[in-house]
Amino acid sequence: CFMEHVRVAAGRFLISDAPIWSTKPTRGIDLVPTDEFMREAKLGNGIISFNDRTTPKSDGRLRVFKQAVRLAFCESSSLTEVARQLVDYNCPGDSVIDTNIEQTPNADSRVTLDSDKDALGLRRVRLNWQLNDVDRHTVRTLAIASAKEMARLDLARVQLADFILDPDHELEGDGIGHHMGTTRMSASPQHGVVDWNSKVHGISNLYVAGSSVFPTGGGTNPTLTIVMLALRLADHICGMN
């Protein structure tokens, strides 16, 4: 059950003149689902981020010329669309919607040892990261629901990616760098690697601290949870002495 938060560029949006865009320090809005919505729609957890941080800038000796060309493209919807077919092209106020989605624990998503060896003669690590239908359903449902909410509140005009709107398209995304799972915490060795004190099942003096013990990944950054688990483990070991 190797887990990673799923990042997907779910679409673009143009902000309205609502005060919220100019008053928030990061000029952005994060939308999170309620527990009720997740249960009803059978979703994992996650965050949909609308960040107005992509006002284009040009650098170099030709920056004035390049900026003039860019603004000329942005004034024409047809030229902008042509540019977007070639590169990830942003116009002023045109931002990308990002996701931070919880991955469902999946036994097929795993870390194993490869037959190839490194320069020290040790077997290399092989990562087989697998998403499932629940993960794809979560990304698409939260993105569509967020777009509808933005329209309802008149905060932004949203254009979702084709692979969000059409389930027949393969989901385009990658990981964020929040590696979790593989030594999950469990009540018994049949369902995990460590017990509730982070001690490896069946071994009296081996403990694991870190996000690898997470049974689920949650929908937010794992750092604070990692720190809390490490402090908890430290207190436990100190109490044994």
Image (cartoon, rainbow, N blue to C red):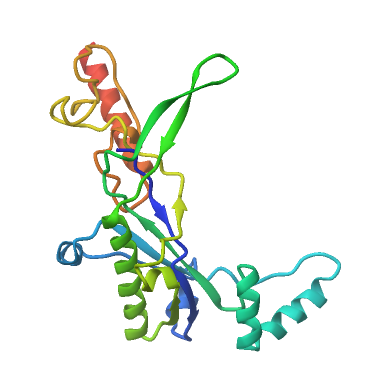
Q: Residue at x 30, y 64 (%)?
A: 32
Residue 168 at what x, y percent from top left? Answer: 36, 67
Q: Is residue 143 left or right of residue 63?
A: left
Q: Residue furthest right?
A: 61
Residue 117 at what x, y percent from top left? Answer: 53, 20
Whether residue 18 is situated above or below residue 187 in the rendered picture: below
Q: Residue at x 27, y 26 (%)?
A: 233
Q: Is residue 104 left or right of residue 6?
A: left
Q: Quadrant of the C terminus?
A: top left
Whether residue 189 is situated above or below residue 172 in the rendered picture: above
Q: Residue at x 30, y 40 (%)?
A: 108
Q: Quadrant of the N terminus?
A: top left
Q: Quadrant of residue 201?
A: top left
Residue 13 at what x, y percent from top left? Answer: 48, 77
The residue nearer to you, when weighing 6 against 127, is 127
Q: Residue at x 27, y 38 (%)?
A: 107
Q: Is residue 37 left or right of residue 79?
A: left
Whether residue 232 is situated above or below residue 134 in the rendered picture: above
Q: How many marks?
A: 0
Whether residue 46 is situated above or below residue 129 in the rendered picture: below
Residue 72 at what x, y percent from top left? Answer: 72, 85
Q: Quadrant of residue 19?
A: bottom left
